[in-house]
Image (spheres, grey):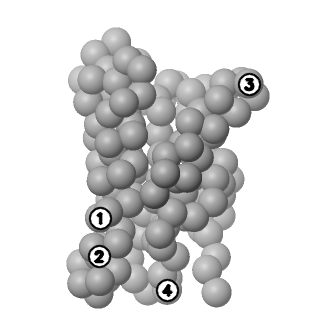
Amino acid sequence: MFILHERLARGCVDLGVHGICRVLLKDQAHFPWILLVPEVPLEVTELHHLSADLYRQVCESIREFSAGMARWPGIEKVNVAAIGNQVPQLHIHIVGRHSGDIAWPGVVWSCAEKRAYEPAERDRHCERIRSWMAVS
């Protein structure tokens, strides 16, 4: 049974499942930020821990969501990372960046300013991401 880490659940909107990945929208309005959380046992904490087949499935989701993020209005660069230093559950960040964003050119993790989405903005972003999920 899959259990989402409490820190991921607390800071994100759960949009459902794509392939074997739970899809989350991070509630940080400064950046369009998606997390993919493979629904695998908790002891699988690194991408290289996945079987070859599961690795391909996760990479396909990363590719599809990265392509979607690249089409997001105003996005110049798509950052993809699987860090896991603070949350051990395997998860992949897909973040849309542009040269005018608050953390540019640094990393989003160094951005001390947090801003939650306004409900209407969050709902628009959720619908956009869900439309990518429906195509696959």
Residue 105 lies left or right of residue 21; in this view the side is: left
Pointers 1 and 3 in contact (C-beta within 8 Å): no
The kind of secondary structure element at disc 1 is helix
Mark 4 lies on a secondary structure that is: loop
Rendered residue at 64%/87% (across/down)? 1
Instruction: Read off the residue under disc 4.
Output: 41
Q: Quadrant of residue 108?
A: top left
The location of residue 63, given as percent across then percent down, is 30, 53
Observer-nearest residue: 54 or 32? 54
- Above/below status of 80 relative to 42: above
Q: Amino acid at mark 3?
A: Ala
Viewer-nearest of labels 4 and 3?
3
Mark 2 residue type = Tyr
Q: Secondary structure at mark 3?
A: helix
Farthest top residue? 100
- Residue denoted by label 1: 59
Residue at left offset 37%, top offset 18%: 74
Amino acid at dot 4: Pro
Mark sitting earlier along the chain (4/3): 4
Q: Which mark is residue 55?
A: 2
Q: Earlier in the sequence, mark 4 or mark 1?
A: 4
Q: Which residue is mark 3?
A: 120
Give the mark nearer the N terminus: 2 vs 3.
Answer: 2
Alpha-carbon span between mark 2 and mark 3: 35 Å
Pinpoint residue 100: horizontal percent, then vertical percent: 34, 12
Q: Residues within 10 Å of mark 1 (few under 14, many from 20)?
A: some
Q: CA distance from mark 4 to mark 2?
A: 14 Å
